[in-house]
Image (spheres, grey):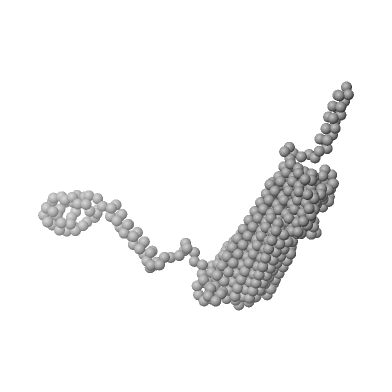
Amino acid sequence: MRKMSKIVIMVCITAMILINLPNYEVGAEISGTAPSEAGDTLIGNVTVWKDEVITLNGNLTVNETGNLTLDNVTLLMNCTKNGSYHIEVQAGGEMYILNNLNIRSANEYRYLFWVKNDSNFEMRDSELSGCGFDSDYYNQGLVIEASNVVIENSAFSNNYNGIILSSSNNSITNCMFYNNHYGIYLHNSSGNIVKNCVFSNNNEGIHLFSSSNNEISNCYVSKNPIGIHLSSSDNNKIADCVFDKNDYYGIILFSSHNNNITGCVFCKNNYASIYLSYSSKNTISSCTSLKSVTGIHFSYYSNNNIVKGCNISDNVNGINITSSSNSNFIYNNTLDNVNNAYDECTNYWNSSSNGNYWSDYNGTDEYSIPGGNNKDSYPSGIFKKETKIEEGMPIMYPVIICIAIILVCIMLYGVIETKTIIIRCPACGKTIRVKKKVRPFNLECKHCGRKGVLR
């Protein structure tokens, strides 16, 4: 009896232990510090969480001695109100997010995520959503203050902002940003690379504020009110990107200088493909703007910019220059729009030897730019291949065709009207068989030699 009682007690104790264990999936791996069931979790050693679904009811902090790897983990932040819990990687700490990790809110309340300066952070092949809730700096979303961060093959959706960078030399590649306020927000940030990313249905795809020497390339930016917005940001490069169906602008430059926009394609952006305001010494080259309201618009003291080698076609307006925007150089561009250009300021529409290609150039003299006294001194017309006439007496082609038609008609008439007939000679009375047209002819009788009209 005593033995049975001991067995029952051991079973009960075991059951109680099992009931109170965290609800990890079968095959889950925990090494180092386990996540807390209630309250905050502090990582101060080397810790790996793998193949788990974890719900946190408190903050997750990686301190200066901590090293946390999340591998194929679903991490649910169970906040009690917006911003009640956060994830923080402190200076000296390390965090590695890998392999289908999914961090999201467990309910309608939103969490915060901070990667502090002098920490190490990587995120690969993962997703982050439900992070951040307002415009206060640390409330915005994934705030990265560390440098040399690598983020690749990851998705950021339904956050206040996808990523906030205020650091240098970070790399964001092959990522997707959708349904955020800003996909990426760069603040006092330099030397960063954003490459091969997709930005869709955000308020702005990328916003740069007071940020320099960053490179954005090979990105697809679609269905945002504004694709990329540079504000007080200099010496950045935007290359080989596609801007498609953005509600207002593909790119805005506001008080931004010495930026380079090259090789980009803009299609069906409702207001303008590129809009410059208070922005100078920027270069726009080898870009294409199609089916937008305006290709490029210079406004409010945007001076000394260069537009060259661009194809600006099938827009309502090609290039518009207004509001004291002077000394801009526009040359070697193709303009084929409803209104090719408007310039009410003083600018240069040709280089020392090359002007632009105009769909409405009449082939004589200089090309006058509507709106003021500007001219293209070396204009060229746009000649469409389907209407080009080959050299070699083109006027003779219709004549030759008409002659050929007449000859064919004569031949057909002769064939149709010709048959074999029998005619009697009035002199000798004998008949002859001839293959001639049915009408009198001057013939010779082969019997008597009479010449004349034979009936």
The residue drawn where x is 62% and y is 75% is 347
The residue drawn where x is 69% and y is 54% is 151
Left or right placement of residue 241 versus residue 399 in this view: right
In this rendering, the answer to whether 86 lies above or below 272 is: above
Left or right placement of residue 405 versus residue 303 in this view: left
The residue drawn where x is 69% and y is 61% is 169
Percent position of residue 333, x then y: 56, 68
Percent position of residue 400, x then y: 35, 63
Q: Quadrant of residue 307?
A: bottom right
Location of the C terminus (image quadrant): bottom left
Percent position of residue 276, x then y: 67, 68
The residue drawn where x is 74% and y is 58% is 146
In this rendering, the answer to whether 165 lies above or below 17 is: below
Q: Extreme right residue here? A: 2
Percent position of residue 200, x then y: 67, 54
In this view of the protein, which residue sits in the foreground, 380 or 430? 380
